Structures are given as structure tokens and as C-alpha cells.
Amino acid sequence: MKPGATLHPDVVQEVLGAWVLAERREPGEVSVELGEDERALLAQMPWPLRRAEWLAGRRVAKRLLHEALGLAPSRTQVLPLESGAPRVWVGGVAHEEFVLNLSHTRGWAVAAVARTRVGVDVCDDVDGDRIARIARRVFSEGEAETCGAFQSRETQAAVWAMKEAGLKLFIGGVFDPGARAIRVESLSPPRVTANPAMQVALLRLPDAAVAVSRDA
Ligand SMILES: CC(C)(COP(=O)(O)OP(=O)(O)OC[C@H]1O[C@@H](n2cnc3c(N)ncnc32)[C@H](O)[C@@H]1OP(=O)(O)O)[C@@H](O)C(=O)NCCC(=O)NCCS
């Protein structure tokens, strides 16, 4: 079972009223136009894998902001809030009109932008089984059985993405309250219960699950 509607790479798609874009990761550090603050942050990052994923996130985010909202990459910066959540800056000013979120794996970089809160997460199918290793920490009583989490590595990836996208919607509360706060009720149709209530869309890339979360 591979739950989720198709998300076409390199095409901006509207999902739950948000714009979403996925790019396949390229090896090493991708080229992307960076602003002064972004260059300063990158200069402090010594680890090659972190630099590469951070750049991939910036690239897909800036492409999305350009294609969906017309924001020129030369004037746009994507800088972290204290929580680590991304914030868009245009011409040196924090952009309050839109909320951006992004996610990266070994295979993909995905960004989502909307007028109100949005969370996005991608999970490569090959990494789906990591959820089984931490099942006791992330699932509530009966949750995994009810939603069919362990049917396949694709369902495991889907559940992981739904929980992470849900946590990211809170911007700042990723570890507190933690993954149990998002209860996955069903994969088809995708449905979670959480407080505050949220809606979640589930999408499929060729070898990965993507989830997008919005306030209900
Ligand atoms: C910090 C965390 C956001 C990292 O997530 P991840 O899956 O390792 O990585 P992703 O690539 O999907 O997301 C990272 C991006 O999320 C964004 N982000 C970071 N903190 C965030 C927050 N508090 N709220 C919203 N978005 C956040 C950032 O843009 C970050 O990328 P960047 O630093 O390169 O800009 C967080 O989700 C995490 O580590 N969660 C683990 C909690 C857990 O138990 N998960 C099990 C789920 S079943």
C-alpha cells in the first residue's frame, strides 16, 4: 500500500490551500543565491551533510517563493527563528504575510508556503522503518494498529511524515509535546487528531511520503 495523492517533482502544486514544491536532491552542495545573513550562517556550518541539506532547503524554498509568489531570490532570505523554524525575509524585512516550512531527506527537498501556518515533512521510504524502532515513544495506545502504520515501509514513511508535519505546524513545539500529540487515525483518507485541530494531506513522491499540515 502506497497511500497518498501524487506530488509531481519540480511543479508547484496547491495542497490544502498551501503551495508546495519538491526537488530531488543532487549530490553535494547545490548552487543557490544567498543573502548576507544566509552566507554568514552557512559559514558557521562545518558539517558537509548539514551544509548540503541546508542549501537544498534554501534552494527549493526560494524557487517556491519565486514561482508561487513572485519574490525575487536576490532579495529573499530564509532565516531560522529561535525555534529553528524558517522565516522569510524580503529586502531585509521579515515577511509577515506568508508562512514557510521546509523539509529535507537524502532523496528530496520540499517546501510549502501559505498565508497562515503550514507544516511540511518528507520521509524517504527507505527510512520508513525507523518509526518501528521508536514506536513506544511516538504512538498512543492502539494508534499504529488503527491506521495500519506497519503494513509496509511506505505506510511507515507516511505516518512519520504526518506526525512530523503536524509537529512542525506548532512552530516551536517540536519536542514538546512530542510525536504522540499527533494521533494518526487513518492514512486513506489522511486524518489526524491533535490539539489544536489540524488537517493533513498525504502525498507521494516516487520513493517518499510527503505530508502537509494546516490548522483545521
Ligand atoms: C527539529 C525537527 C524539525 C527536524 O526535523 P527532521 O525530520 O530531522 O528534518 P526535516 O528536514 O524534516 O526538517 C528540518 C527543517 O524543519 C524546519 N524546522 C526546524 N525547527 C522547526 C520548528 N520548530 N517548527 C517548524 N519547522 C521547523 C527547518 O526549516 C529545518 O530545516 P533547516 O534547518 O535546514 O532550515 C524536528 O521535526 C525533529 O527533530 N523532530 C523529531 C521529533 C520526533 O520524535 N519525531 C518522530 C516523529 S514520528
Image (cartoon, rainbow, N blue to C red):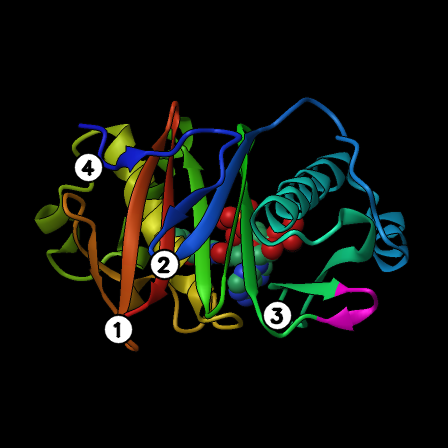
Lower sequence index among marks 4 and 1: 4
Read off the residue under disc 1.
197
Give the foreground label among 1 and 3: 1
Which callout, 3 or 4, points at the residue further toward the start of the chain? 3
Quadrant position of the N terminus in the picture: top left
- The reply to whether callout 1 and callout 2 are in contact (CB within 8 Å) is no
Q: Which residues are magenta?
A: 90-94
Q: Amino acid at mark 1?
A: Ala
- Quadrant in which residue 133 is drawn: top left
Residue kind at label 2, given as amino acid type = Ser
Dot 3 crowding, Cα within 10 Å, few <14, some 14–19, many 20+: few
Res 150 label: 4
Q: CA distance from mark 1 to mark 2?
A: 10 Å
What secondary structure is found at the residue carrying circle 4? loop
- Residue 93 among those drawn in magenta: yes
> In the picture, residue 169 is in which quadrant?
bottom left
- Residue 132 can be seen, yes or no: no
First reached walking from the N terminus: tag 2 or tag 3: 3
Residue placed at 39% from the left, 73% from the top?
A: 177
Q: In the rendering, which numbered label is found on residue 213?
A: 2
Q: Which mark is residue 60?
A: none
How far across and how far down the image is residue 151, in percent? 16, 32
Task: Look at 32% across and 58% down and name the residue there.
Answer: 137
191 relative to 154 in the view: left or right: left
Q: Which mark is residue 83?
A: 3
Mark 4–mark 1 Cα distance, whole angstroms, equals: 25 Å
**Nearest to N terminus: mark 1 or mark 2:** 1
